[in-house]
Image (cartoon, helix red, strand yellow):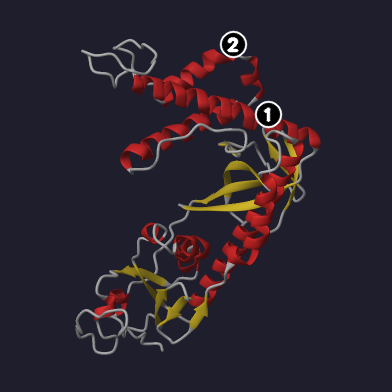
């Protein structure tokens, strides 16, 4: 099964914008209520049986089950009778909000992620339609439940044979966007490994090794060095001036809201420029090669030191994710190698040369 996501910009009418904002507000209320319910259940069980908690907590029966997705979805059906505003939103949209919370809760425990946070009106920015009607796509509009036909900018055609499975409406600083999840029932073969064609000399293609860094974004084994663009540094002065003006604005005022939108559009411009450059670089590195090898680096640790700002500006993790998608579409073999000891091994003969201090390390490309 091949799954892809295409993003397009929507051009809704003022009435449709009001419906989208109403949907986001109701989804935010459902998220906060469900999260509060889970936190109260956990807090009611953290106090020992022989002592009382110093904090005020709700008293919940000891045999009350944990409010998981299925129980909260059932409560949502009953709550529609008491709160009519829940009926203004598609039922599957609210169910997807609870599913997202349930997935975030599981990731917190299984993958060590942070605790799910409550959402204000600026933090929850998207909702999902898990199902669309029959023939929902036209060249000039997209049909969404509760919204009807919404005009959009079809920046690229939908691939033939793909089926639209779901749609996610996202509010960004520059407008409203929709991400269509496309699926095609086909088996995608993985690129051939070097061993499947007789090793490195089996004619699978030219191998290329990549080394990432701060001064040079990437240095290849072919001797090519690509300098790292300063996406944030280029516009940092402008961002600082706008944020300096922001602190003098009254909270909740229209001027503060307008200035926040201007800052958000500037940050989105930086993000879009970085992502576009990553895609172009990934395609450039895949030209004329059959294999690409990179170091398996934990980029999260790079953003905890003195170079955290420059690491976040470069977006190494995003570049690796984009590169993994590009090599699959370009039929290029991609592999990550162990980073330990790479500075202690001769690139020519493979002999171990021992540990080196930074003052004697010389790049083989220099």
Residue at left offset 49%, top offset 29%: 98
For this rendering, which residue is in front, 328 or 13? 13
- 337 left or right, relative to 67: left
> Height in image: 243 above or below 150?
below
Residue at left offset 28%, top offset 89%: 348
Q: Secondary structure at mark 2?
A: helix
Q: Residues within 10 Å of mark 2 (few under 14, many from 20)?
A: few
Residue 146 occupies quadrant: top right
Whether residues under marks 1 and 2 lie with C-beta atoms below 8 angstroms apart, the answer is no
For this rendering, which residue is in front, 243 or 340? 243
Q: Position of residue 78 (x, y in %)?
A: 52, 13
Residue at left offset 49%, top offset 70%: 330
Q: Position of residue 311 (x, y in %)?
A: 46, 63
User: In this rendering, which labeled residue sits more in front, label 1 or label 2?
Assistant: 1
- 300 left or right, relative to 98: left
Residue at left offset 73%, top offset 35%: 253
Residue 360 occupies quadrant: bottom left
Tell me the tag on residue 22: 1
Question: Which residue was labeled with disc 2?
Answer: 81
Q: Is residue 137 at least partly visible in the picture? A: no
Q: Position of residue 349 (x, y in %)?
A: 24, 89
Q: CA distance from mark 1 to mark 2?
A: 19 Å
- 147 left or right, relative to 225: right
């Amino acid at each position: 099964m091949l799954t892809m996501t295409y993003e397009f910009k929507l051009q809704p009418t003022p009435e449709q914008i009001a419906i989208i904002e109403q949907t986001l507000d109701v989804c935010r209320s459902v998220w906060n209520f469900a999260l509060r319910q889970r936190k109260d259940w956990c807090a009611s069980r953290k106090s020992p049986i022989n002592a009382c908690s110093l904090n005020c907590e709700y008293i919940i029966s000891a045999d009350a089950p944990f409010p998981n997705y299925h129980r909260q979805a059932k409560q949502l059906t009953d709550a529609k009778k008491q709160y009519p505003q829940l009926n203004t939103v598609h039922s599957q949209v609210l169910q997807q909000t609870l599913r997202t919370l349930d997935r975030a809760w599981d990731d917190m425990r299984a993958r060590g992620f942070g605790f799910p946070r409550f959402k204000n009106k600026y933090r929850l920015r998207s909702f999902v339609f898990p199902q669309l009607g029959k023939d929902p796509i036209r060249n000039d509009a997209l049909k969404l439940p509760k919204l009807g036909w919404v005009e959009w900018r079809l920046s690229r055609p939908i691939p033939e044979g793909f089926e639209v499975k779901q749609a996610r409406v996202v509010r960004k600083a520059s407008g409203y966007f929709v991400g269509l999840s496309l699926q095609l029932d086909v088996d995608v073969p993985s690129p051939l490994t070097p061993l499947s064609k007789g090793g490195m000399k089996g004619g699978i293609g030219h191998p290329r090794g990549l080394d990432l860094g701060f001064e040079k974004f990437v240095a290849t084994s072919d001797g090519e060095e690509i300098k790292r663009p300063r996406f944030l540094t280029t516009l940092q002065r402008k961002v600082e001036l706008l944020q300096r003006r922001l602190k003098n604005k009254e909270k909740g005022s229209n001027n503060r809201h307008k200035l926040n939108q201007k800052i958000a559009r500037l940050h989105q411009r930086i993000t879009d420029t970085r992502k576009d450059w990553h895609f172009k670089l990934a395609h450039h590195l895949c030209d004329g090669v059959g294999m690409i090898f990179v170091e398996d680096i934990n980029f999260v640790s790079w953003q905890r030191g003195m170079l955290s700002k420059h690491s976040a500006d470069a977006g190494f993790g995003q570049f690796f994710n984009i590169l993994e998608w590009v090599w699959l579409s370009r039929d290029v073999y991609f592999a990550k190698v162990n980073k330990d000891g790479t500075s202690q091994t001769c690139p020519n003969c493979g002999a171990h040369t021992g540990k080196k201090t930074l003052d004697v390390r010389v790049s083989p490309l220099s």
